[in-house]
Image (cartoon, grey):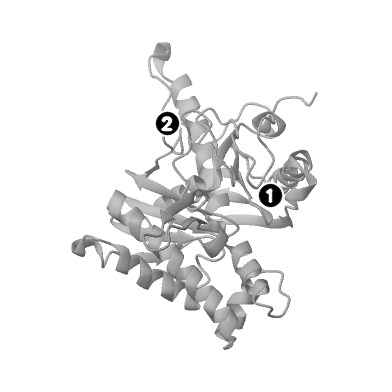
Amino acid sequence: MAAPPPPFTGDARRWAIGLDVGGTKIAGGLVAVASGEVRARTTISTRPERGGEAVLADAVALAERLAAAADADGLEIGGVGVAVAEIVAPDGSVGTAHLIGWAGLPIRERFAHLAPPTVSSDVRAAALAEARHGAGRPFDPFAYVTVGTGISSCLVQGGRPYAGARGGALVLASGPLSLTCGACGATVRQVLEEVASGPALVARYRRRGSRPVARAEEVVAAAAAGDADAAAVVGTAGESLGSAVGFLVNVLDPAAIVVGGGLGIAGGLYWERFVAATRAHVWNAAARDLPILPAALGSDSALVGAALAAAASVAAIADEAATPSGAARRAPSLVGAGAGG
């Protein structure tokens, strides 16, 4: 068994390792907590079809490389934050295996030899980063929406992403919307991720008999180049997303919407149709002109937020330990209680 890391003697708010484990890639970096600056940025393919244990081994190895880079630069790491594209319970356990098969695996224990670990859902980590260093800073509350391999959302109020009672306050597009036609009686069970996510764009474009593509970026590029099939797929995907986000605005009444993820920051036709459809589906006229902004941190949002969550958790423990007679109770993590969220 690996020896535990030595006690952290510096300021836990200075540097942390952040990992963003998504369905397509694992991105990592050394994050300056005060500024959101990312050093030693590294990305590898996730290949989730290999199983959760293989993905976890790769994530740990990536974190170890980042820890070595920090040591070489004389940077003391205060924590390791892992953001994963799944539902993470308040205790830090991964509860689903929709994209990454980590349910039931001892995730935190596998990173504990490097620095105190924190596990977060990727959308809440990204929302935290945008609240602290990104497009969400001027707004309270705001809703963060991420669009890539999957589609999720998070409400941020008082700078804190809301996790819900079980860590599940992020599901926007995975469950079906069931509607029965009044004319013919047919029931449609539409799942938004099957229409508007990155893999959906690829699958829908292929079904039209168009040229083979492997990535959503290729479909978006084809639409921009005038491909009518690609434009139809991309345009209807943006409109479908907008209908869901408009409903989100109706329910939450946020001051702004911040959108991240690969598709969320792609711009072009997808963005144009999405924004127009969102405004068209907002019922309250006073809310229809709310700001709808791309994530300022771009593809770094989740890894930066994971590092911020880890640093906040370590700092809370240090603050408690420094309180005379242990009178203070540990503050909740910025993404959920304890090391979860």
Please give the residue where the numbered disc 2 appears in the rendered image: 165
Image quadrant holding the N terminus, namely top right
Q: Earlier in the sequence, mark 1 or mark 2?
A: 1
**Left or right of residue 307: residue 107:** right
Q: Amino acid at mark 2?
A: Ala
**Left or right of residue 59: residue 255:** left
Q: Which residue lies at the image location 60% right of the left edge and 68% below the top edge?
A: 201
Q: Is residue 208 visible?
A: yes
Q: Secondary structure at mark 2?
A: loop
Compared to 164, does 203 lie above or below? below
CA gap, disc 1 to disc 2? Answer: 41 Å
Please give the residue where the numbered disc 1 appears in the rendered image: 73
Indicate which disc residue 180 carries: none
Q: How dense is the environment of label 2, judged by Cα within 10 Å: few (below 14), some, or many (20 and up)?
A: few
Foreground of the two, 132 or 268:
268
**Left or right of residue 18: residue 290:** left
- x and y percent of residue 248 in the render? 35, 54
State which mark lies toward you, 1 or 2. Answer: 2
Q: How dense is the environment of label 1, judged by Cα within 10 Å: few (below 14), some, or many (20 and up)?
A: few
Foreground of the two, 172 or 163:
172
Which residue ends up furthest to the front in the rendered image? 184
Which residue ends up furthest to the top in the rendered image? 325
- Labelled pair 1, 2 in contact (Cβ < 8 Å): no
Q: Which residue lies at the image location 38% right of the left edge and 14% below the top edge?
A: 327
Compared to 258, does 336 lie above or below? above
Q: Secondary structure at mark 1?
A: loop
Q: Residue 224's quadrant in the figure? A: bottom right
Q: How many marks?
A: 2
Foreground of the two, 267 or 159:
267
Q: Amino acid at mark 1?
A: Asp
